[in-house]
Image (cartoon, rainbow, N blue to C red):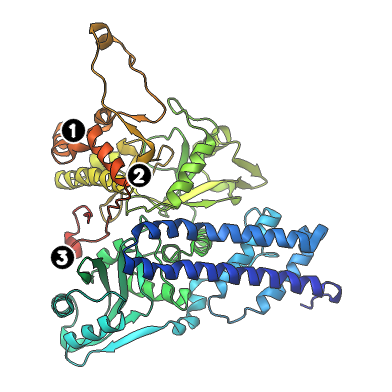
Amino acid sequence: MNTPAPDRGIVAESAKAIYEEFLRYNDAFSRTTNRARRRFEQRDWQGHQKDIVERVELYEKSVQRVVSSLRKLQGERVTDHALWNEIRWYFGERLDKVPDAGFIKTYFNSTTRRIFRTVGIDPEVEFVSPPFEDELELVQSLNLRRYPYWGSLDNIFTQVLDDFSFKVSYADLEGDIKVMADEVQQFIRMNLDGLDGLIRFEFISSVFYQSARAYLIGRVISQNNISPIVIALKNTDEGICVDAVMMYEDEVSIVFSYTRSYYFADPNSVVAAVHFLHTILPRKPIDELYTVLGRLRQGKTERYRIFNNHLLNTQDKFVHAAGDKGLVMIVFTLPSYDLVFKIIRDKFGYPKTIKRQDVLDKYRLVSKHDRAGRLIDTQEFRKLEFPLDRFAPELLDELLNEASETVVIEGDKLIINHVYIERRVRPLNLYLREAHHAAAERAILDYGQTIRDLANTDIFPGDLLLKNFGVTRHERVVFYDYDEVALVTECNFREIPEARDDDDMMRSEIWYHVNEHDIFPEEFIKFLAMNAELRALFMEVHGDLLTANFWREMKEKHKQGEVSLVIPYHRPTIPSKQLKKSVGLD
């Protein structure tokens, strides 16, 4: 295709503007990411939390800037479809074979989608993301540190900790080396070919930071296997120490969970890093690996592409998701794919008093907060289109009648103007009916631990009904209904006043005054819709969650700047089949 000469100037200037603004965004992303090392060394956990918020906001601010610049540059031609087709061709030609070019093309697409308010995909002004496999020729560019096995694990881990050193010294270097070597040796003898089959260790050269931990991400290569190895480091009063060595896929998968905050890591090639992670976590979706590295838009692009391909190659219909009907959201799923789609209703059922904007604000709050492994990552999409005939009649009827402000039919397509998409989990209330006794007990204890973990990160769930919590494939309980989420520091936790007389006790409605942010933890017992045995177990272990004093103490800790950290693994390292306990607190 030849670009017409009269437009070449504006084509080149437009493409250049997008590319240079992407570079500015990417530089800002890297600067924020690279602060994580200093935060870790200085134990500045509050600063790390601020960086989480700042980095999430970078992308949208950058796209808004470039869109504004292009409107000024192109004037009336800013929505000229033919012009933008030429810009897309010109832009793409200059990115051929460039490492991680997919990120730059995704940025280009974000720009055109805002300008044209694109519904679905417009391949004339957007880049259609290639399959992940098509980019694998670029993965060799990833910087790795390689450690061949010459007969001594101690020597290898001595070199590893020397290569990944910090301004803060290790507290017990020799002790850490011995622990690492012993655990790795035990794992290899139990699960791989034995030490005689061990070839080498490989670690991504970039350290991964999340909350108050630094992680070394690697793999063990033996004659017949590739296995993950993740080394967790923590910074203590005495210095840095090895906190855990994880080598089972299940426990490493939890560390990279879609319920945790995004990592701060800056590998020289993100595509190559994602491919590396996929070799050690083959069951982890590619889109989630992009997202967990903080590349949220690329994660969204991959999620939509992979799901759309699945939709084209299946015949099942969208149906209501399992669980109780939501008062705020219509939730549906495609049975053959483990995602759920959440659309805000036009009107909320009683007793909900919140407004649509309140719901949007709550989901934005969660997207920028430390999710502590207890809040599902939710991606917000706009103007998606789906085949109309793929919706079950009862679902389609509800969408058209109760979400008409969001959903519309155009020809043979259903257009969804706004939707949240997240991983599907089993609602806790349904899980408890189906699970055997021991699994139900573990789930109830983890339900309480989930509330506790969220409180430690300044999150009050708001609605504690079991139907608002789910169970993951790792049998971990998570929270997913965000429309009443609040910061603990914004709530006023009170005891229920004593009745003044018999008349007060007989009233069907409360007789005492309740302010907007008042919370009465004693009432939480109403949400514990479980059998007597499970309720007794919950009360024995987590009964303090039903006291105002617990929540007031937690609120005061947060106001004083104390940070309680929730870590995504257990100490000491244990086999994945034993990963049944709740995640602990520092």
Q: Is residue 283 visible?
A: no
Seen in the picture, residue 357 relative to 148 is either above or below; the reply is above
Seen in the picture, residue 150 relative to 224 is either above or below; the reply is below
List x then y, in percent, for residue 527. Answer: 28, 31
Inter-mark Cα distance, 2 to 3: 28 Å
Q: What kind of element bears circle 1?
A: loop
Q: Is residue 414 visible?
A: yes
Q: Residue furthest right?
A: 6
Of labels 2 and 1, earlier in sequence is 2
Amino acid type, label 2: Ile
List x then y, in percent, for residue 261. Answer: 38, 58
Amino acid type, label 3: Pro
Q: Residues within 10 Å of mark 3 (few under 14, many from 20)?
A: few
Q: Residue furthest bottom?
A: 150
The residue identified by callout 1 is 531
Between marks 2 and 1 in the image, the one whose residue lies nearer the viewer: 2
The residue identified by callout 3 is 572
**The disc label shown at residue 459, or none:** 2
Q: Where is the C terminus found, in terms of image quarters?
A: bottom left
Between marks 2 and 3 in the image, the one whose residue lies nearer the viewer: 2
Q: Is residue 66 left or right of residue 190?
A: right
Amino acid type, label 1: Asn
Seen in the picture, residue 300 relative to 394 is either above or below; the reply is below
Inter-mark Cα distance, 2 to 1: 27 Å
